[in-house]
């Protein structure tokens, strides 16, 4: 089928749906009308879309952890702990990596082994294996809205199951859950799959149930220049809106320089609003900042420093939500106690900064305009490549390296661009690859990195990039050469 | 001198690509010919790449916690495929949760891995170990040859 940025027709959607629901045995339990009736009677405080809208109106930043384990009862225990001891405002269901790759058979084997061994063998909740009734069991056991957070290129069945199960938010997108999460699945395919997911959300909206959608902002989570992630977020937002999504949260991963991070969140919100208006979509728009997604210090006390800095950035930027890291980040999946500590540390910082915003300054204004100008260079070319069709344009943009995400595993990503920090720790483009920035922008990026190279007495090189990747883990933002 | 071939990749359903690209860069700088099969790689992909390139070592990364399940049986499969003395290294966040590293190391050594690395290990440590292990293997090969001549 030809890919187009156009709302899926009822006929083709329901035909596809019949097949999607056969991908695993639990698909047979999804009944759209029954699910709508069920969702209409769940208490309002458990609806994700409503809670996001209220937080924005109240001008507060909500804290949400990541969490998920293999077995239902253990998962409930974990979420209740994060709600009661951590003070989370929103709850996640992080989905395991086998489910993300649609490997439900392997998921089942791991569920069985988790039961035998009495420890979770999975890095998340295998929601497709557990099915609709277990999603509802989880929702019944908590007092907060639930979201699925994953990294699934083909999340069609997962989306059907979670929403029928009462979870009112879904993270992901055709670009953001492909390029950083897959190796050999074409972008054409995943954009099409996510049109399906967005259409499911759109159907619920049309049937009177509000569902929140969140494209995954941080991408590879490693030195992604803000304009590249903002371009992806705006494209995925527009693609979702076309399928009928109304309540949308656009995301960004903290880079570490406060001015740049605040500028990025505000540029994202303002620019997305302009595009939605231009293309005639009415969207309830909110934002999310992800605390530092790169390598963490192994020392737990140092990790709290990184966590709090992310919380402060989210508050000062005015993000509607912040995704929380834990002091076990360097070691992998955290214990529930460590996870709750991350939330408490975040909430303390958010509460201290409640009502405070970083006010506009010359630096902040300039940075915001730079990010918007860079983003526009990318988006203009994407529209041009697609002859006005955003879905086609996005596929072609990745083919030609007009869009390019650093350190992404996908074969469909050019991998020609390189990022590095300037002397103030802001992330700049070191190699532009095929990104169509104008000369002024290129010169400015080059100049900032040349200044850094001069200060460090070395050439601008890949070693600089490697040093930046490990810097936060070692205790600094900029990866300076070691003084011998 | 011919460079030594080594196979590098991230095993299982794991898509963590950043460390993989850094290891590729570091081991190449360290003088090895790196055959990088990338993320989301099955055991068979590692073995096929090792056979095709006559590699001296397989370096397995796992960041997402399923490493224990994904790495089981790799040594046995290598032997079945005729890769008798190939060095097997593993590193990353190999298991779910913060577990005592010594017990993780022991579990992986039992599975037949020659070296097991804790999270946050510098690539330099792996490069140094690989050079030591390869030199030892070479010495052993010479010794075996000499032994044949004598007997």
Image: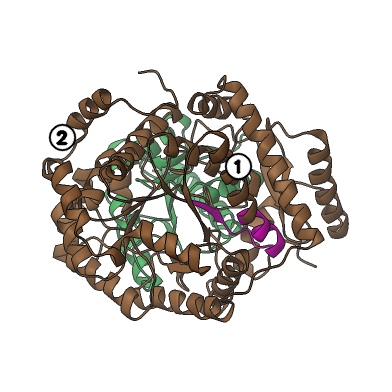
Chain colours: A brown, B green
Q: Which mark is residue A255?
A: none
Residue at the disc numbered 1: A274
> Quarter holding the N terminus of chain A?
top left
What is the crowding at mark 1: few (fewer than 14 residues within 10 Å), some, or many (at least 20)?
Answer: few
Where does the image place residue A463, in percent across and percent down from the top left? 71, 50
Residue B33 visible in the snapshot: no
A482 within the magenta span: no
Residue A238 as seen in the image, left or right of residue A72 = right
> In this view of the protein, which residue sits in the foreground, A40 or B28?
A40
Q: Secondary structure at mark 1?
A: helix
Where does the image place residue A461, in percent across and percent down from the top left? 75, 46
Q: Is residue A7 above or below residue A89?
A: above
* x 58%, y 76%: residue: A305
> In this view of the protein, which residue sits in the foreground, A59 or B75?
A59
Disc number lying in front (1 or 2) = 1
* x 74%, y 63%: residue: A360
Q: Which residues are magenta?
A: A249-265
> Quarter holding the C terminus of chain A?
bottom right
Q: Which mark is residue A22?
A: 2
The chain letter for the residue carrying disc 1 is A
């Amino acid at each position: 089928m030809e890919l187009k940025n156009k709302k899926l027709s009822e006929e083709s959607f329901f035909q596809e749906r019949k097949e999607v629901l056969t991908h695993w045995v639990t698909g047979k339990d999804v009944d759209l009308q029954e699910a709508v009736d069920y969702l209409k009677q769940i208490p309002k405080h458990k609806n994700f879309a409503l809670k996001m809208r209220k937080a924005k109106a109240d001008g507060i930043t909500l804290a949400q952890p990541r969490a998920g384990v293999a077995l239902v009862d253990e998962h409930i225990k974990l979420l209740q702990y994060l709600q009661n001891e951590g003070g989370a405002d929103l709850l996640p269901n992080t989905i395991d990596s086998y489910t993300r790759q649609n490997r439900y058979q392997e998921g089942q084997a791991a569920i069985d082994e988790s039961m035998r061994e009495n420890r979770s063998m999975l890095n998340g909740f295998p929601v497709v294996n557990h099915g609709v009734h277990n999603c509802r069991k989880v929702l019944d056991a908590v007092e907060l809205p639930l979201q699925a957070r994953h990294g699934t290129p083909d999340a069609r069945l997962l989306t059907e199951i979670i929403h029928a199960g009462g979870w009112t938010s879904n993270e992901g997108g055709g670009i953001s859950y492909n390029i950083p999460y897959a190796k050999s699945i074409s972008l054409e395919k995943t954009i099409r799959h996510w049109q399906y997911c967005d259409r499911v959300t759109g159907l619920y909206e049309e049937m009177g149930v509000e569902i929140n959608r969140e494209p995954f902002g941080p991408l590879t989570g490693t030195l992604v220049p803000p304009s590249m992630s903002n371009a992806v977020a705006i494209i995925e937002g527009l693609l979702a809106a076309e399928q009928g999504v109304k309540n949308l949260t656009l995301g960004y991963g903290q880079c570490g320089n406060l001015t740049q991070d605040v500028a990025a969140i505000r540029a994202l919100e303002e620019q997305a609003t302009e595009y939605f208006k231009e293309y005639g979509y009415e969207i309830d728009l909110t934002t999310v900042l992800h605390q530092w997604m790169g390598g963490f210090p192994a020392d737990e006390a140092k990790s709290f420093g990184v966590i709090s800095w992310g919380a402060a950035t989210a508050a000062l930027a005015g993000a509607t939500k912040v995704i929380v890291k834990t002091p076990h980040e360097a070691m992998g999946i955290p214990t529930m106690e460590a996870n709750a500590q991350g939330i408490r540390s975040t909430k303390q910082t958010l509460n201290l900064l409640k009502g405070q915003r970083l006010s506009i300054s010359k630096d902040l204004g300039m940075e915001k305009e730079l990010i918007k100008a860079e983003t526009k260079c990318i988006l203009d070319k994407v529209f041009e490549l697609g002859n006005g069709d955003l879905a086609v344009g996005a596929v072609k943009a990745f083919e030609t390296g007009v869009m390019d995400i650093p350190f992404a595993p996908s074969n469909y990503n050019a991998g020609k661009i390189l990022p590095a920090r300037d002397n103030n720790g802001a992330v700049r483009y070191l190699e532009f690859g095929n990104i169509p920035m104008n000369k002024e922008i290129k010169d400015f990026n080059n100049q900032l990195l040349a200044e850094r190279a001069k200060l460090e007495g070395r050439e601008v090189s890949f070693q600089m990039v490697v040093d930046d990747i490990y810097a936060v883990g070692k205790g600094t933002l900029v990866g300076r050469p070691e003084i011998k | 001198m011919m460079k030594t071939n080594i196979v590098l990749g991230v095993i299982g359903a794991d898509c963590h690509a950043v460390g993989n690209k850094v290891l590729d860069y570091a081991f190449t700088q360290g003088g090895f010919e790196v055959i990088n099969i990338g993320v989301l790689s099955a055991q068979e992909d590692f073995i096929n790449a090792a056979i095709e390139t006559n590699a001296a070592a397989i370096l397995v990364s796992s960041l997402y916690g399923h490493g224990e399940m994904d790495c089981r049986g790799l040594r046995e499969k290598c032997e079945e495929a005729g890769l008798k003395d190939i060095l097997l290294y593993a590193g990353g966040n190999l298991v779910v949760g913060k577990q005592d590293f010594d017990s993780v190391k022991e579990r992986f050594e039992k599975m037949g891995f020659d070296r097991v690395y804790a999270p946050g290990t510098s690539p330099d440590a792996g490069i140094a170990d690989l050079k030591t292990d390869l030199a030892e293997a070479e010495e052993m090969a010479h010794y075996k040859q000499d032994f044949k001549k004598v007997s």
